[in-house]
Amino acid sequence: MPALNRHGTCRRPPVGLPPLMRIVTFLSDFGARSPYPGAMKGAAAASGSLTFVDISHDVPRHDVRAGAYLLWSAAPAFPRGTVHCAVVDPGVGTSRAALIVTAGGQFLVGPDNGILLPAARRLGGVRVYRLAPAARRTRISDTFHGRDVFAPAAARLATGAEVASLARPVRRFVDLAFPAGRRRGRSLVGMIIWVDAFGNLITTIPGALLPSTRAGGRVTVEAGGGALDATVARTFAQVARGRGLVFVGSDGVIEVAINRGSAADALGAAAGGAVRLRLR
Amino acid sequence: MPALNRHGTCRRPPVGLPPLMRIVTFLSDFGARSPYPGAMKGAAAASGSLTFVDISHDVPRHDVRAGAYLLWSAAPAFPRGTVHCAVVDPGVGTSRAALIVTAGGQFLVGPDNGILLPAARRLGGVRVYRLAPAARRTRISDTFHGRDVFAPAAARLATGAEVASLARPVRRFVDLAFPAGRRRGRSLVGMIIWVDAFGNLITTIPGALLPSTRAGGRVTVEAGGGALDATVARTFAQVARGRGLVFVGSDGVIEVAINRGSAADALGAAAGGAVRLRLR
Amino acid sequence: MPALNRHGTCRRPPVGLPPLMRIVTFLSDFGARSPYPGAMKGAAAASGSLTFVDISHDVPRHDVRAGAYLLWSAAPAFPRGTVHCAVVDPGVGTSRAALIVTAGGQFLVGPDNGILLPAARRLGGVRVYRLAPAARRTRISDTFHGRDVFAPAAARLATGAEVASLARPVRRFVDLAFPAGRRRGRSLVGMIIWVDAFGNLITTIPGALLPSTRAGGRVTVEAGGGALDATVARTFAQVARGRGLVFVGSDGVIEVAINRGSAADALGAAAGGAVRLRLR
C-alpha cells in the first residue's frame, strides 16, 4: 500500500517501516448479546479508516476493577498509536468526567472512574486530560456515552487528531491502583487482581520476587481464609493433577493455580482480596 | 491512503473527507462456539478489502424478532455505505427469498423473514430487492446461506457492486414491524421489543411522549401481568437501589428498569408482550 | 486503493483483481472474558496492516480436537494467503514445537499437537515446518505463546515473510486425523467430530455416500449406546418437530439432528465417539 508524501504523490513506504495501522480497541460490560459494542464501532467509523479490536465485552456488569485488569493485561501488547476505548461506566449520565490518558505512546479513553489508570501506569509516562464538551457529538444520550462520547473521541485520536484539540490537562481524577505486591519477612504479600475462568488467581506480586532459583520449592498460599500447598513451577505440566502451583504468568506477576482444578474454589478466594505466599 | 481518480492516478483525498471504510457487519444466531461467523467473513473476503464488524452472534436461536431488534438498535450508528448481513434464518434451504434492502444510504442483506425491516424503516427510505440466483455462488449448501449467499452478496455491495446487478425490486416481502407506542388517555402503551441481560425492558414507546417536564414524576408500569411503581428519571443514579424507573434510552424509546434489579423478573414480562405506563 | 508496481509508482489494480486483504484469523480456548485474544492481536499488529478475524475463543479448555474441528470447518471459506493462528496449547512452556503448515495457498500457525492438520488436509497439499527459535520475539513467556510466538509469526507471514525465513521443513510432527467415514455393508460408519450447541452431531461420513436418491428414506442412527430413527432430508423443515433427520451439512459431511430437539441427548452421544447409519 503506497504512502502519500506531503506533496500528495505516491511513494513506496521505507523498507522495514510497516504501514500504519490505526487501531481502536474496545472494552465494555455490555455483553455479547447486546447491540452496543457494534454501535460503538459504527460511531467510530465516521472518523475514517480504522482497525477495530475487541478486548472484551464480557466485563462483569459495573465492575470497574475487572475492566481495569483486562486493559492492564492487554494494552502492553499493542503498538504505539493504539487507542483503547474502555467503557465500564456505572456513572453514565451523571457529572463524572470523560478522560483521555496518554501513556507509552498509546491513548486511553473512558470515564473518570479509574478504569484507565492501571494500564496507563504500566505503559508509563501517564498524562491525564479531561475531554472538552466541544469535542462531543451534538446529541448525546444520557445512557450510552460509549457510542456518543468515547468511541468518537477514540476514533478522532486514532485518525490523527491532537489530544489538545479534544481535551485539556487535569490534575485531579479518580484513581485506581493495583497495589504492588512486596516481600514482608519470609512472605510475599499482595492483592488478587483477577480470578480467571479456571479459578487461577492473578496477583499483584511481581514475578521478580520469586527467583528462579526457587523452582521446585514449596510455598503455602494463604487467601480467602484458606491455605494451599503449592510448588514453584514454570508450567502446569510440572505438577501433578490436582496439585497447587505458583508461577510467573505472562504479565510478569505471580499466579496461583491448581493443575486441572480451581485455586479460587479451594481457597475461597476472590478478586480484590489479599494473598500471601509463605516461602519455606 | 491515496484515492485513485478516474484517470488511475493518485491524488490526496479532499480535506475533511475521510478515506472510505467498507464496512460489513454480521449478525446471526450461530453462537460464539461455532465456526460459522468466521466462515461468513472468509467468504466475504474474496470480494476485496473490507472491515468486518460483529453486531452479535448470540441472537437466541431462530429468534427473528430478537435479531431484528439488535439490528434496529445498532444500524443507525453506522455511516452511509455500511452493509449489514443478518442471518437468523430458520427457513434456510426452503423457498424463502434472499433480500437486499436499501435505507438511509445503508444496505441490509438477509433472508426474507422480516429481520431487516425494523432497522430499514428506522434508517428511512426503504427499498426492497430480491437477490437474483445469478448473483449467488455456484455451489450453495442447503443449510448455510450465510456463507454461500448472504456474505458474498454483502461483500459485493460493500466493494461497489450496484444493487441492480445483484437483485431486482420486489413489492411483496415478509414484513416485521415494531408497532410504535402511543398515548391512550392518561397512559402510554406499546410493546416490549427486548429484555436486556439485566432485565431492563426496552419498549416501542417514543421518548418524546414522556416530556422532560415529568422528570421526577411517578408512573405505574403494567406488563406481564404485574405492576411496578417507577420514577421518571434520566439515569439510574437518580433512584434508590431496588426502585423502579422509566427513562428515555439511547435508542430514543422508553425503557423500564429497576436500579440494580430486574424489571422483567419483578413484572413477569417478556419480549413481545404489551406494556402500559399509567401517568399520575 | 492503488497498487504499487515494482517501480514504486501507482497504478490502477487490474479489473477483477480485488486489492489484497491480509487476513489473520485467531482460534483459542482463552474465553470471551479474557485479555488474551486482544493481546494476540496487539502483538500481531506490530508487523503491519492486517485484517483480524476471530474463528472462536470459546474452544473448550485444552480440547485440541474441538479446536481442530472449528478450524477444519471455517478455513476453506477463506481466500488464498489467509493465515490462521490456532492456539489450544496445553503443552505451552514444554518442549513441544511450534509449527507453520502450508496448504491450499493458506498458512496455519500453532502448536505441534495436531490442531492444524485436519484443516490443512482439507485444504490440500500439506507441508509442515517447524518455527525456528530465531523467528521468535526476544522475550517469550512460559505460558502465553499465542502472544509471544504464534501471533507474531502469523503476522509476519501475512505481511509477506517467506516461510523459509521463519521455519524449516519437518517430517515428524504430532498428527490428528478425522478418520473418513465409509460404507460397511448396508451401513455407513464414521466418527462424531463435533456436537454443536443444539445437540446436532457432525460426523466424518462424506455426504457423497448418502445419495440424493435416498431423500425421504429411513435410516437408523446408532451412536453413544442409543438408536434413533431418522429421515434422509435436505432441511430441518422436511421433518416434523421432534423427529430425527440425517442430512448433508454445509461442510459436506453427514449430520444427525432432531428437529427442535437434541440428537446428542437422545442418543447419549459425544464428540469423538463412533456413529453408524443403518440404511433401510
Image (cartoon, coloured by chain):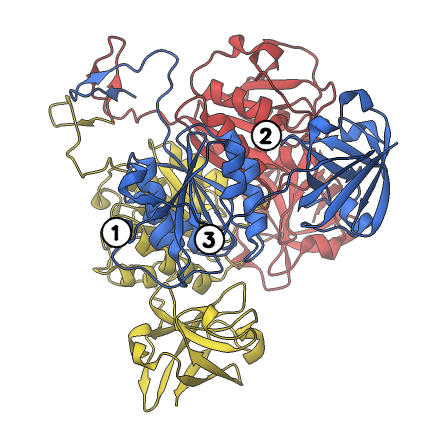
Chain colours: A red, B blue, C yellow
Q: Is residue B235 left or right of residue C42?
A: right
Residue at 85 percent of width and 45 percent of height = B227
**C-alpha separation, residue under disc 3 versus residue under disc 1:** 49 Å
| Above or below: residue B45 compared with residue A1 | below
Q: Which of A1 and A94 is in front in this view?
A: A94
The vertical placement of A198 against C271, above or below, is above
Q: In which quarter of the image is residue C115?
A: bottom left
Question: Answer yes or no: do the residues labelled 2 and 1 have beta carbons within 8 Å?
Answer: no
The CA distance from mark 2 to mark 1 is 44 Å
| Secondary element at tag 3 | loop
Q: What label sits on residue A86 in the rendered view?
A: 2
Instruction: Characterize the local packing of mark 3: few (<14), some (14-19) or many (20 or more) Cα atoms within 10 angstroms.
Output: many
For disc 1, the marked residue is: B134
Residue C25 in the image: state x and y as whole percent.
Answer: 38, 46
Q: Name the residue under label 3.
A: C92
Using the rendered view, name the quadrant where residue B7 is placed.
Answer: top left
Tell me which chain the residue with mark 2 is part of.
Answer: A
Q: Residue at x 54, y 31 (%)?
A: A40
Say which amino acid is labelled 1: Ala
